[in-house]
Amino acid sequence: MAKSIIQMNRDRCYLCGARGTSGDPLDEHHVFFGPYRKKSEKYGLKVYIHHFRCHIFGEKAVHVDSEVCDKLQAEVQEIAMKHYGWTIPEFISLFGKNHL
């Protein structure tokens, strides 16, 4: 498994900044999921977020609120392009669309 190039501190939620707890631990979230999950893993495009409130079930959870998801994907695309030296067309060839 590749380490995240986005988030070095795995103790705090990338979205809200709070620490994970036994009641709401941090999940590893592949920012580009579905058919792009393996590529997110390969390139380290993943963050650590609270399982319940920020990942799956909360009102502003990344899998519930499309605006939160879109913002995160745009932010991570920008970081990845800088990190790997990709152009927008190169990013699109890997991840299917431009999120910027």
Image (tube, rainbow, N blue to C red):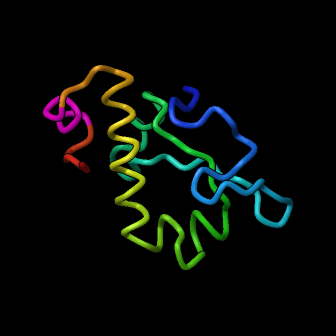
Considering depth in this image, is 64 or 15 the residue closer to the camera? 15
Extreme residue toward the front, this view: 17
Residue at position x 42%, y 44% in the image = 37
Q: Is residue 43 left or right of residue 11?
A: left
| Magenta span | 88-94
Where is residue 13 drawn, in percent x and y? 66, 53
Extreme residue toward the top, this view: 85
Considering depth in this image, is 15 or 2 the residue closer to the camera? 15
- Helix, strand or loop: magenta stretch: helix
Residue at position x 33%, y 49% in the image = 74
Magenta stretch encompasses residue 10: no
Where is residue 64 drawn, in percent x and y? 47, 73
Where is residue 27 drawn, in percent x and y? 65, 52
**Vertical placement of 29 versus 92: above or below?**
below
Magenta stretch encompasses residue 89: yes
Considering depth in this image, is 81 or 64 the residue closer to the camera? 81
Q: Choose top left, top right, bottom left or bottom right for residue 24.
A: bottom right
**Vertical placement of 100 versus 89: above or below?**
below
Q: Choose top left, top right, bottom left or bottom right for residue 82.
A: top left
**Vertical placement of 76 versus 71: above or below?**
above
Q: Is residue 98 left or right of residue 46?
A: left
Extreme residue toward the bottom, this view: 59
Residue at position x 42%, y 38% in the image = 40
Where is residue 28 drawn, in percent x and y? 61, 47
Residue at position x 55%, y 79% in the image = 59
Q: Choose top left, top right, bottom left or bottom right for residue 94.
A: top left
